Amino acid sequence: MTAAAGLRRYTPFAAGSLQGLLQYRSTFLVNAVTATTAVGLQVFLWRAVYAGRTGALPGGYDLPQLTTYVLLAQMLALLQANRVDQEVSEEVRRGDIAVSLLRPVHYPLTRLATGLPVSLANAALVAAPVVALYALLLPLTAPTWAGAVLFAVSAALSLVIGFAVNLLVGLAAFVTTNIWGVRIIKDGVVAFFAGQVVPLALMPGPLAAVAHALPFQGMVDGPLRLLLGHYTGPAGAAGILAVQAAWAALLTGLAALAWRSAVRRLEVLGG
């Protein structure tokens, strides 16, 4: 079987996920209102903190760049909310995972196929309108063509990292059954160390060093540094992408190992 034929097996999962999303179009309206409110709180808070300041702010950002960073940080977080962790844990809790194992497909890839439409739909139907709205209301920094291309590549890698993190959290359901607490902790840790709450450039040195040593910075801070040109030459841009690619590969490998271990300990009772 060719690689293309193998990947076509997962098309129905992606199509089914997209159809399910479109059955509840009001969800996108709720997400858009929620995202607009959350972004507004963050953006206007930072603008109030640095009101009246001209030139470079701490971290090397000026006010339009900082506004752009805070806005797009929330949008990247929205793209990575693919529900994979929640859906895996629900399948384990209900025992539906047994049915999934009977299908002639690789389970983690089916989760990727169902999660990707969620991310793309959030990008098209929520993130894009919210960014357009704030672009009309506030001065933002327009990216260069090089910055836009680097951001696109980096954002794709950030989705892989986010998927792997969510899948690992979802697989914890094989041990704990209920992962509500694990998800809450994960959401808080990721938001902080990814740069969603506070740009990493504004963190104290030791804390920023910890953040840069973790994979989460590749989910938000890395893509936005590339977009806004906060790197030193081509080598700096290549370094950010290389670190993202390394973490994406490592976390994907860990998720594959965790899946194999989880299947070995699975017990489903029924009659």
Image (cartoon, grey):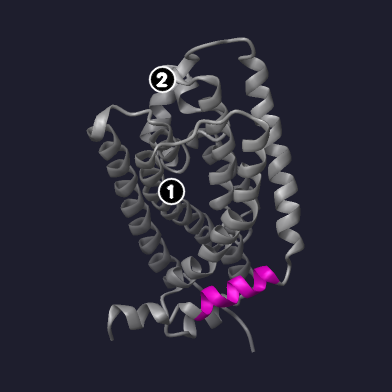
Left or right relative to 188: residue 141:
left
Amino acid type, residue under disc 1 in the picture: Ala
Q: CA distance from mark 2 to mark 1?
A: 26 Å
Left or right relative to 211: residue 253:
left
The answer to whether residue 216 is visible is: yes
Q: Is residue 208 above or below residue 170?
A: above
Mark 2 or 1 closer to N-term?
1
Q: Is residue 149 above or below residue 59?
A: below
Amino acid type, residue under disc 2 in the picture: Pro
**Position in image of residue 120 (x %, y %):** 54, 60
Q: Nearer the viewer, residue 10 or 188?
A: 10
Query: Which residue was labeled with disc 1?
Result: 155
Q: Residue at x 43, y 24 (%)?
A: 208
Residue 216 occupies quadrant: top left
The answer to whether residue 267 is visible is: no
**Position in image of residue 168 (x %, y %):** 47, 56
Q: Are marks 2 and 1 in contact (CB under 8 Å)?
A: no
- Secondary structure type for disc 2: helix
Quarter that holds the C terminus: bottom right
**Position in image of residue 133 (x %, y %):** 67, 41
- Secondary structure type for disc 1: helix
Q: Nearer the viewer, residue 229 or 93?
A: 229
Query: Which residue was labeled with disc 2?
Result: 206
Q: Nearer the viewer, residue 137 or 251?
A: 137
Q: Where are the magenta residues, as a range?
A: 12-22
Mark 2 Cα shell of 10 Å, populated few (<14), some (14-19), many (≥20): few
Left or right relative to 231: residue 73:
right
Q: State yes or no: residue 78 in magenta.
A: no
